[in-house]
Image: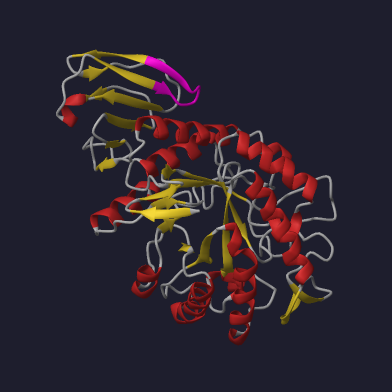
Amino acid sequence: MLKVQGKYLYKDDKKFFYLADTCWGAFTSITMPDWKYYLDTRKAQGFNAIQINILRQWDSSLPIDQREPFAIKENEDGSYVYDFSKINKAYFDNAANMLEEMAKRNMVPVLVLLWGNFVPDTWMSKFVSNNTIPFDQIKPYVEYAVKKFKKYNPIWFVSGDVGFTDNGKQKKDSAIKYYREVLNVAQSIDPDGIYTFHINGESTEVPEEFKKQTQMFIYQSGHGYDGQDTAYTIPEKMRKDGYQGPMMDAEICYEGLTKMKAPSPARYSAFDVRKAAWHAVLSGADAGIGYGTFGIWPWKDTARPEAKLDANFNVQLVPYDWRQCLGFRGCLDMGYLKNILEKYAPNGLTPIYTPVQDDPTIRAAENDEYLLVYLPTAGVLDFDEFNIQLKSAQVIDLQKRMPLTGKVIDNTLQMLPVVEDELVIVKK
């Protein structure tokens, strides 16, 4: 069972670096043989958690027949209406069987209790054609779900991709009312659980009452072309504002996904993913990372053409088949990041803000033994900026995952034949 101590998660009294894959549509869309294969692959790649939406994901592939959490009426236009008073027990039994498979592999389920599309006045309202949950049905649903799943010791995401600000796209009052009910009911059933909120991208706004009731802060630097620097600006802001709990970027840019609002159609690459992840963990959000691919979170399955994308789907480019996504190089980069932090920062890191004054994209953090510096673009590095004197440094070519010996002249790391990004490791 996970516990929170200070800035980190612990499991069996050992610091636990949360490395989650994102599979929002797991419970509705995956057969058991495919689920076992998927889990075995991710486990081998270093993942120890899976992020799942308990209910039907609003912008994913259509569910397997009868795989609905409530009694449902489907309309000719593709919309559907749930009878939230009639829980489909077979759906939840199958979900529990899927969580049993995770338990066999010692993997942590991260379960979203109520995604934003089920709440009125969210930014998703203009996209969704399905119905929101009546307020009086929140309690019986949450009670049932938490009782059913709490034995698997999940991390509970109270919300899914929802915001708590009035900004023209959403209204906070409905969200606060609904999620207050979700959180209070869940904690009455599982008072020892770990709770947090999955808020929308590039945001830090969580009402104070919710901060007091939750044990960690997660954010998403997300998928906006112009918002990728929030991978480091958000944790820097939160730490400077005094937040002392575990923090993680649980939705970095999904590998293969559309770069939203980019000047021309493009997809996020493994390099983009690495950059966001290293920016986050060296800037105060070193409790873990949530990775995702454009094909697994909506569960695109070309072997099941009937599982086409839901009518709600609003992303520009076509997703990959989930089998292809398992082989994306970014997932191995995340496992490599986890291994590096477990080796060089077993007790955590303290960020060094703006270590290089003229380039905020260079991020650094340290502990008693090591200094870690991330350079998104290979180049020279003046160690005078860090007030240390060196003769050599270890460098890792992150694209190749290959260690190099850095040459230092006049306390400046010289240029190495690195094509993309690099990590500099200095033993103090």
In the picture, measured across the screen, residue 337 lies left or right of residue 319, that is left
Which of these two is toward me, 204 or 369?
A: 369
Please name the residue shown 36% across and 21% down the image: 395
Q: In the picture shown, does residue 149 fall above or below 296? A: below
Q: Position of residue 53 (x, y in %)?
A: 62, 61
Please name the residue shown 64% across and 77% down the image: 141
Report the residue that reaches farthest toward the bottom. 136
Which of these two is toward me, 379 or 84?
A: 84
Q: Position of residue 322 (x, y in %)?
A: 71, 43
Please name the residue shown 56% across and 41% down the image: 47
Q: Position of residue 313 (x, y in %)?
A: 68, 60
For residue 114, what is the image quadrant?
bottom right
In the picture, measured across the screen, residue 143 lies left or right of residue 7, that is right
In the picture, measured across the screen, residue 316 lies left or right of residue 411, that is right
The magenta stretch is: 396-404
Q: Is residue 290 visible?
A: yes
Q: Is residue 192 magenta?
A: no
Report the residue that reaches farthest toward the front. 12
Q: In the picture shown, does residue 325 fall above or below 198? A: above
Q: Is residue 398 magenta?
A: yes
Q: In the picture shown, does residue 239 fall above or below 33? A: below
Q: Is residue 321 visible?
A: no
Q: Position of residue 96 (x, y in %)?
A: 70, 60
Q: How many marks?
A: 0
In the picture, measured across the screen, residue 332 lies left or right of residue 214, that is right
Which of these two is toward me, 203 or 159?
A: 159
